Every structure is written in structure tokens, then in C-alpha cells.
Image (cartoon, rainbow, N blue to C red):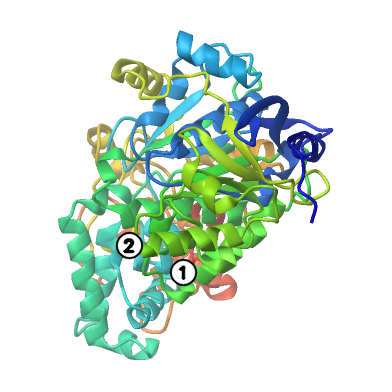
Amino acid sequence: MAIKSTADKVATIQKGYTLDGPTIELGAAIVDGELHKDAPVRLPLAMMNRHGLVAGATGTGKTVTLHMMAEQLSTAGVPVFLADIKGDLSGLATAATGSEKLLARTESIGQAWSGKTFPVEFLALGGDGQGIPVRASITSFGPILLSRVMDLNETQESSLQLVFHFADKNNLELIDLKDLRAVIQFLTSAEGKDALEELGGLSKATAGVILRELINLEAQGMEKFFGEPEFNTAELLRTAPDGRGVVSCLELPTLQTKPMLFSTFLMWLLADLFEDLPEAGDLDKPKLVFFLDEAHLLFNGASKAFLDAITTTVRLIRSKGVGIFFVTQTPKDVPADVLGQLANRVQHALRAYTPEDAKALKATVSTFPTSDYDLEETLTTAGIGEAVITVLNEKGAPTPVALTRLRAPESVMGPSTDALISSTVAASALLPKYGTAVDNISAYEKITGKGAAPTGPAAGTAQQGAGAGAGTQGGATAGGLDPNAIDAEARRIEEEVLGRPSSRTSSSPAPAPGMPPEYGEAPERRAPRPAQPTGGGFGGDLAGALGGGLQSMARSLGTQLGRELLRGVFGTSSKRRRR
């Protein structure tokens, strides 16, 4: 084969990256050791929902790369989700200051650089850190994801699915950890012996193991991550008033000691989007680009059910207009079935210090198209802020492999000040919705016969109004929010953000044999219960909650319309979709 000249190699890259539609500018090509700013490397915006991989050894610039891509996506009107593990990505809210060195670099690649700020929404998992609290109900989180957090084996995971089945069937809302603990304790008690036998496949010993793991989670302080108000993932699809996409930055630095929790929570966000969004087909630009940092944590020791669910989600969410970029150290961190769906590749330098490293390097090289580069050498000698790139062009074909000097971000490459983050959070429109945790009547209260005990700043108001419905079931918050207003907001999000007609129907699961008939009532049709003990236990009398006629009608509706919850590929099910 004839050896190409440098000019021919440059021409190949120029031709391969000449694109008609809007693009994300990645940088300029380096060929035979020389930088060519007349050979720009770019990624078509319309191809970003074909997913991608940003990989490379520690310290090679992966975080800066996703920072730079997020800026351009926001400018193009595309919302972005970022998991900020180190705390560096909060700098998107602060304009960078140009230095002589920075400007020399940007000029060398043909980048017209200027410092800019971007619209950022700061989120914090469970309110653990600075940001709008992101919580999920246990029901929504589902048994497969929860098994991942609890590190259950496949047998225990199957048993936990039976527990969720029991709760779904009997209208026992699993909102927080104490709700799930109450259901398991009931099933392992003498009172729940018959219900446990009816489930089949769930032994009392396995239920006991699950219960111990659940108590361990509570002992580690993880109860704050589960509860209400549950975060509506449609909030991630917002744009700013000026048309730029909002960058949702989930702060995670305090959770580095709980990697399984935060990686699984990220997958819950993605799974919830997958279940909620309508089919969109091929779009000019994605509805959302989701950067999943430290992706290897998702897959380490994952069960087959979990891996299958990830693969299914990645494969199908593309048609709903969402692009996913996995960020990790080497491609071998990602299972082959998932890796095969990541069409856009940004590969930073790899190291080959050990035989294992050398093996990973060879495997990485084998996944790239044939190129004019010696990729084994290129990938071990690339500098910080340089990466080997191949993406899909507008026709869906791979572009030529190009060693690229990447663009510099225009906002601060580091954290914003605490004062700026605090003021941004305080001014957020999401704070009134999610800032205060509430504890509505759910499985724990039904089983123990205790009334709801709202938590957080609104607790006092809620307790005063408990008899008048401040602690109402089915989504009304303890602070006394109007359920009709909540439904109206849900309809608005469905129609304006998700772009589909709203259908806010309700149905009532029929009570299982041996269960009190009130448990089959539809939450939205149930009158408020007083927030004090009703003197029961699981089989206790709930007669004070409803008048006789209404009680009878609700039981009848539960019998006629009873159904179990529909759960997605991860076993997830959103309460918002059931109201």
C-alpha cells in the first residue's frame, strides 16, 4: 500500500469532517506531529443521540472535554445533564479569564475564544451538598436498581421483586426506606405468614437477609436519598429564557465513598426519562445529552438483569431524542453490548505501564476504524487536552480517525464560588417544588397504623393541618399544596416539556385476599386521614378515614378497576404516572 503524504492525510480529514448541519466543534487535527487548524474536527449535532464514549487515563483531560462539549450543546439550545463528581463542573456558571497561554492555544486551533457563563441548575442527591434536592421514591426506584444499591445477589434480587409485587398489588406505597422495611417486617411476622406463602419463591430467611441489608442502608444515612417530593426528570429538559439549554449539574463530591449509590441513581434518572419520553425519531438536535461519568461503577459486579436493562435502555432511548456519553478510563470498562452502541468516540491518552495496561491498549486500538495513524503509539504519546476521535457523519458513516487538539472551555475549568452556587440555588424555580422533604401516608403508616409525620421546614404547618388534609395521600404535600395544582403542573410538564397530550387517569388496585379492603382504594379518591394513630396495626380498623358510603364505593371501584403497576426495564415505576 502506498504511503500517504501529510497533505493527503490532511485532505482526508478535511473531507471527512466537512458537514452541512450544525455541529459541535471539537478541535483541530494533528497530522505527522503538526497541528493543522485548517482541518477542524467536529461532531454533527444530529448524531449526538447515537451515544458516545469519552475515555482516557486519569489526568488526560476527560472532564475538560465534557465541559467543553456541554458549553456548545447549551449554546445550541440542547439541555445537558452532568454528574459533577470532583466539583469542577460548577465552573460552567462563571466566565473564564483569558491568559496569554490560553489565547495562544485557542488561536493555534482557530478557536475564537471569549469568556462566557452558561445557565446552570445545581442539583444535589438527597440534598447532600449545595443544590436542589434530588430524591426518588422506593416505588419509582424499583427492585433491580435497589438491589444494586444493596449489593444483593440474583436470588435475593428476585425475592425483592416479589416484595415489590406484593406492595404494588396491595396499594402499599413504598416512598422511603421505612416503608419497604415495614412491608418486609410484616411479611416475616406471624401476621404476614399467609401473605408470604401466597407470594411463593420468597423464603422467610431471604426476606430476613434483605431486611438486614435495608437496615444497613439506613445506618449509613442513605434514607435521605429516598422520599418525596420525587424529582421529575422532565426538569432536565428545560431551556433558559434566551433559548440556551439548561445544564443540570448534579453535585456528587460528598458521595465518593458511596459510588454504588450515585452511579445507580444516575441510571434511575436515565430510566425514568426512558419511560416518560415519547418516541421522537431522528431530530435535528437531541432533546437532552446525558454525560455519565465514572461509568465503570455502573458495571462492576452488576447482575445480568441490571446489565440487560442498561443495554436495552441505551439501545432504545436514542429514538426518544436522548444521547448518552459514557465517561470512563478505558473502553474495556464498558460491556461489549453497550460499547457496540457508542458510535462517537473521544479517546484520550492511555498508559501501558503493566501487562494489563498493554492488553487494554491493544483492545482499544482494535475498536477503531483503519486509519493513517499508528494508534498504539499515538494513544500512548498524546498530550493532555489531545484525543483520538472518530464520530458518525450526517449519513451515519464513521469519520476518519483524527488525533485532535481539543478546544478550550469558555467558562472556568474549576469550581464556582460557594456564594455563587448558593445564590443560584436560592433563586431557582425548582427550590419551592423540591426544597422541603415531606412524609405522606404510605406503607409504613398503613401497616403500623400511625399517621404521617411530615419532615423539614413545613412540618409544623403540616401537623397543624393534618386533620384538614395537609398530609393527604397520593401526592398532596404536607405543606398544604392543592392536589389539583400539582396535577395541573404535571399536565403542563407532559404537554409543554415532554411534547405529548396529557392523560391524567387513575385506577384502583383491588385488595389482595386477606388484606383490608381500604388498601385497594385509589389514593386520589381517598379522603384525608387524621395524622394520629388509628389504633390498628396492619389489620387495624381504618373506619375513621372514610364515611361508610364512600368507603363502599371505593372498595367497589378497587374490585372493578384493580390492576398492578406497570414497571419498566429496570423495574421502575413513577408515582407521577399513576396519579
Residue 229 drawn at (x, y percent): 39, 43
Residue 281 drawn at (x, y percent): 78, 51
The image quadrant of residue 517 is bottom left
The single residue placed furthest to the front in the displayed view is: 2
Q: Nearer the viewer, residue 10 or 279?
A: 10
| Label 1 neighbour load within 10 Å: few <14, some 14-19, many 20+ | many
Residue 548 drawn at (x, y percent): 41, 64
Q: Nearer the viewer, residue 268 or 188?
A: 268
Q: Kindly identify which numbered label has been placed on residue 306.
A: 1
| Label 2 neighbour load within 10 Å: few <14, some 14-19, many 20+ | many
Is residue 447 among what the camera can see? Answer: no
> Residue drawn 64% across and 61% down?
315
Look at the numbered discs 2 and 1 and tell me whether their residues touch, using CB distance below 8 Å.
Answer: no
Q: Tag 2, which secondary structure?
A: helix
Q: Please, is residue 164 above or below residue 293 in the view? A: below
Q: Who comes first in sequence, dot 2 or dot 1?
A: 2
Q: Please, is residue 269 above or below residue 45 in the view? A: below
Residue annotated with mark 2: 149
Q: Please, is residue 414 above or below residue 179 in the view? A: above
Q: Tag 1, which secondary structure?
A: helix
Q: Amino acid at mark 2?
A: Val
Residue 52 drawn at (x, y percent): 60, 49
> Residue drawn 40% across and 51% down?
136
Q: Kindly identify which numbered label has been placed on residue 156.
A: none
